[in-house]
Image (tube, helix red, strand yellow):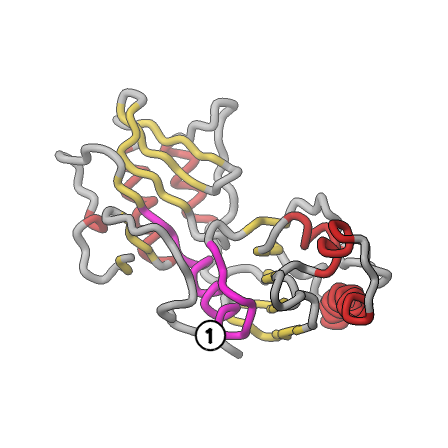
Amino acid sequence: MYDARPLKGLFYFLPVNNMKKLDTNQSIELLLQFATLAGDLELTYHQSTHKISLQRQQNNLLHFRLPLTFPALPTDEQGRVSAMDLQAYIQDIPLMPKPYLLLLLQAGYAAIGYCQGGEIQKHKVIRKYMVRKKQGKAQLKHLNSKGKSRAGSRIRLANTVDFFEEINAKIAEWHVIDKVAHIFYSGTSDMLHLLYQSKVAASFDKKDPRLRKLPFFTDKPLFKVLAHANYLLRLGELIEVGDVEGYNFDFLDADDVIDW
């Protein structure tokens, strides 16, 4: 089993003074606070970003991005969440995250992890020479733009083919795709698309509803970056955007949450 605490320097983000990171228990406690306020304030859930907005007279007070391992919230047709539905939802949050796959992609680098109970149980880092050093282009893009096929280009092209075949082969070898509730990934849409052009078939469909892109930037896919991404996706993200004076939000001033 593998896990990691936050590692400085691996991720880049814009500084936000009013942002807090909450672990699973803190996230549940915050949702309980939201449930008590649902009668006075409006709760709206945005499924595409997995985020709850707390509003007063259509003015946003707080945004809370749920831990990515939490299930989607039940809403009405307008995306609103009732106190009753939120309380029932909280009761159904699993104590341990369901299994999930984590896939980080960059040109020439991939890190794959299979996670159970929030911990990495299987992992693989794949590296291939796919980028021309001076130009920094992935081989397929370079060939499309230049149309050349020199010896170095042919090597990089062969490595590119091997790269995506090895990713798909490793995921298939683990026999876990039917067990996972989520498939989290980072990388461009072009990189993800190339998985489906491989001679070794991808284990999941491009329209698989379990696919979810990570909402943060990841550095070069190495194991320590994979472990840190796994740590971050299990945290909730609370942002204060309006005047919350008069409401008792303990976590806005708590010392034990993770400031960024």
The answer to whether residue 120 is left or right of residue 7 is right
From the top left corner, tell me how far across and down residue 205 is, in percent: 75, 49
User: Residue drawn 68% across and 53% down?
Assistant: 192
Give amino acid for label 1: Asp
Residue farthest to the top? 57
User: Residue drawn 33% across and 27% down?
Assistant: 42
Task: Examine the rendered structure and indicate whether residue 123 appears above or below residue 96.
Answer: below
Name the residue that disc number 1 marks: 3
Q: Quadrant of residue 241?
A: top left
User: Residue drawn 28% across and 20% down?
Assistant: 57
User: Residue drawn 52% across and 68% down?
Assistant: 226
The region drawn magenta spans 217-238
Task: Examine the rendered structure and indicate whether residue 86 appears above or below residue 208.
Answer: above
Magenta region includes residue 88: no
Residue 112 visible? The answer is no
From the top left corner, tell me how far across and down residue 231 is, in percent: 44, 65
From the top left corner, tell me how far across and down residue 232 is, in percent: 43, 60
